[in-house]
Amino acid sequence: MIEAHNIFKSFGDKLILNDISVKFQKGKTNLIIGQSGSGKTVLMKCLVGLFEIDKGSIFYNNRNFSRMSFKQKKEIRKEIGMLFQGGALFDYMNVEENVGFPLLMFSDMNTQQRKERVDFCLRRVNLEKSNKLMPSELSGGMIKRVAIARAISLNPAYLFCDEPNSGLDPQTSNVIDNLISEITKEFDITTVVNTHDMNSVVEIGDFIAFIYQGQLWWQGDKNQILKTENKEINDFVFASELTRKLK
Amino acid sequence: MKLISILGKYLLLMQQVFVKPDRVKLFFRQIMSEFITLGVDSLGIVLIISVFVGAVVAIQTAYNIDSPLIPLSMVGFTTRQSIILEFSPTIISLVLAGKVGSRIASEIGTMRVTGQIDALEIMGINPANFLMQPKIFAAVIINPVLITLSIGFALFGGWIACIFTGEVTSTDYISGLRSFFDPYTITYSLIKTSVFAFIITTVSGYHGYQTRGGALEVGAASTKAVVYSSILIIIFNLILTQLLLA
């Protein structure tokens, strides 16, 4: 479980996160949603420690991450897998090397064991026989799947996904969403997904936190979000003509 | 104030770079790979420039010797001294600042803007150490090798020029090359080269690492890396010459 207590973060004079407190449960796909510029990416980067928070605290299974030394944070980070918006695969490594990189750095596996684990992860994301391809040879959806395989290679306890569907067609988006949701349940991971894709919200949102102007405006699940009377969240969820008609 | 701020950021980055690598075995593998990228891949341009610079220095020296009292072997002597003391270590290091420096800055800068450095950080890896330390060690080791080859090829270029222009005989040139040789000049040259290699890799790495934004900023970082490395090479050339030769 990941808990954030009263988080404040500003850049210069601009307050980006304003007193955010939220809990992300284990074994669930937790979504952070909100308009562009609402602060959801900053919140995620604060949670993983890429940004230092100004005030508040972050707990990973009751371990206070925000008060940890660099060395202690490094240990927690070995339990974290992250899927970046663009995939962030290492350009100079092929698929197999990308997925095997965390294993090479942090496990005592020999070459054969590493190869088996890489093959398992690639099979899990339906990418068999792509081991030797370079990132430049992959499609957008394949890049995301390799990034997921890399993120789960070390059996993480926490999985963060920053806009996993950006730049993908609706069908591929669905595949990625389902993959994230399945992996979360299968490996009992605390997954936090940052998205503004409404399909993801309806499909996989076990828990949803809606961020509006840097504040936690609403929280609930995929069933509650469609019935809420909250104006801001309705403006966000039913932004298009089509969704308004469907409602 | 801005200069102090940049110096402070540079020193803080170096503090992150010079720590024990997470995986020593992988670190040595990275160094071997950097030997190829930074050293072997630069061999062609270094040798071509060296041969032509050596040839030009020899011809210019011969052209400037008018007095019959000065022996023609002075062409070989002057070419050797110019090449060892200045042309090979400084000019070739400036060329490498352009070639290797821009490569390092753009490589690390691109990794920064595409989130690859964040990915390393999330994995619990020290990105500054992982990306920069192998490059620094590799350049400090391989650049003196490049410069030694450069000196050899430049002196060969001078010999070719003397033969083809007929200004100086082969015997005179070689006799000049061998006269009054002080091995310390080689030591001085290689010390300079190692310091320049450190400047090129750390300054370029710093500019790459500080990149924020997109393609435009990566280009700007690459340009800054070359400009600042070159300026620092020129400044340290003067400082080291004063310290080691005065």
Image (cartoon, rainbow, N blue to C red):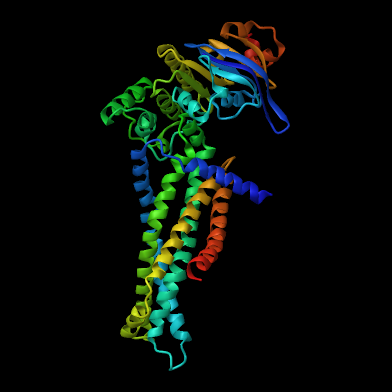
Residue at the spot x=28%, y=29% of the render?
A110
In the orientation shown, which residue stands out farthest toward the right?
Answer: A13
Residue at the spot x=53%, y=61% of the render?
B236
Q: Position of residue A174 (x, y in %)?
A: 48, 18
Compared with residue B31, is residue A216 higher up or lower down, i.e. above or below?
A: above
Q: How many marks?
A: 0
Residue at the spot x=45%, y=70% of the render?
B85
Residue A198 visible, this orientation: no
Residue at the spot x=59%, y=21% of the render?
A196
Q: Position of residue A230 (x, y in %)?
A: 70, 10
Residue A228 vs residue A199, the one in the foreground: A228
Residue B11 vs residue B220, the one in the foreground: B11
Residue A15 visible, this orientation: yes
Compared with residue B27, is residue A44 higher up or lower down, i.e. above or below?
A: above
Residue B104 vs residue A50, the one in the foreground: A50
Compared with residue A132, is residue A207 higher up or lower down, i.e. above or below?
A: above
Q: Position of residue B144 (x, y in %)?
A: 39, 60
Decide if residue A29 is on the left or right side of residue A225.
Answer: left
Residue A159 vs residue A147, the one in the foreground: A159
Decide if residue B38 is on the left or right side of residue A45.
Answer: left
